Amino acid sequence: MNGWQATEAGALRDAIPLPASQAARAQGRRRVLASLGIAGLMLALGGGGRWAWQQPTHELSLASSHGEMRQAMLPDGSRLDLAAHTSAHVTFYRDRREVRLDQGEIRFDVHPETARPFTVATAWGRVRVLGTVFTVAARDGRMRVAVAEGRVAVWGSRQSAADTPPALELGAGQSVQIDAGGMGMPGAIRPDQVGAWREGWLVFDAEPLPDVVARWNDYLATPIRLTDDPGLRRLRLTGSYPMRDAQAFVASLPQVLPVDVEWQGEEGLLIHARH
C-alpha cells in the first residue's frame, strides 16, 4: 500500500505501455487533431488572403469650392476634371475602380483596363466603362450622363443588384438623365460640348431656368436670383455662353425668354417674369 502511495500516476503511465489497440486509437486521434490543425490554418490563411484581396489599394477624396475647377490624375493614368461645387471619393481595388459622386460634375478620361472596370455611382444610378471620355453630373435632384468618346453602360438606382444588365448603353454624342421618377430617353449632344466648362463655356440644352441660374452661380461672385413666380420654373433655355462674360448672358435673357432683369446692387441680379 505504501508503494502505491509513493508512486506518481504520470510516472506509472510512462512506465507501463498501453495495449496495442489503445495505442493505435491514441495515435489516430493525434493524426486527426494534426490534420484539423493544418486544415484550420489553411482556412485561416485563405480567409486572410481573401480579406487582403478585397482591401482598397488607393483612396482619394476630391472636392472643389465655389468658382473653382480642379484636376486630379489617378494612379492608373485616368484624369478627372471637377466642375465647381463638386465632391467625390475615389476607391481603387485590385479588380475594380470606383468613384462615388456626391454632388457636382466630373469629366472622366478613363484609362482602359479590361480586368478592372471603372464605375461611377450617384444617388440616382451608376455608370460603368472600360475606357472612354464622359461626364457625370449629380445636381438639382437628378443625374446626367453625357459621352464624348467610347461607350458606357448605365443603371438606374432601382436596379439594386450589381449583376443585373444595364438599363441602356450610351455611345459618343449621347446623353441621358435619371431622377426619382426613373430614367429618361437618350438625347443627342455634340461630343465637343461634353464638359465644355473646362474650356470656359456653359452649355444648356432645354435646361429649366432655375438650373441654369444655379450653374452660373457656381462661378459668380455676385449671385443671380429668381423671384418666386412659378412661371419662371417652367421656362427652359438652350444655348452656349462664355463663362467670362456673365453680363452678356444676362443681357440676352430678355431676348430669348419672357423675363426682365433687375440690378439690385450688392444683392445681385433679380430675374422676374414679364407680365
Image (cartoon, helix red, strand yellow):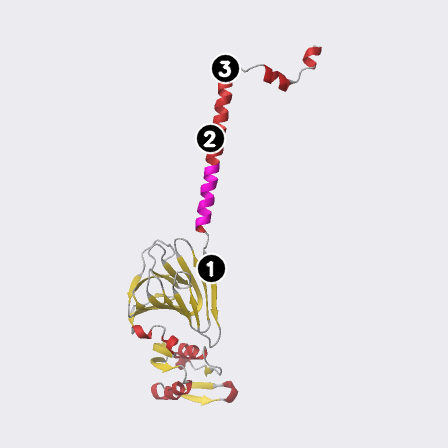
| Labelled disc at residue 59 | 1
Query: As rendered, which of 23 and 146 lies closer to the eye?
Result: 23
Secondary structure under badge 1?
strand
Query: As rendered, which of 60 and 265 lies closer to the eye?
Result: 60
User: Where residue 113 sits in the image (x, y, percent)?
Assistant: 34, 58
Within 10 angstroms of label 1, few (less than 14), some, or many (20 or more) residues? few
Distance Cα–Cα, label 1 vs label 3: 63 Å
User: Where residue 73 sits in the image (x, y, percent)?
Assistant: 42, 66
Q: Does the rendering let one see residue 158?
A: no
Label 2 sits on residue:
35
Disc 1 and disc 3 in contact, CB within 8 angstroms: no
Give the amino acid type for the residue marked by disc 3 in the picture.
Ala
Give the amino acid type for the residue marked by disc 1 in the picture.
Glu
Q: Is residue 207 magenta?
A: no
Q: Residue 6, located in which quarter of the rendered image?
A: top right
Magenta extent:
41-53
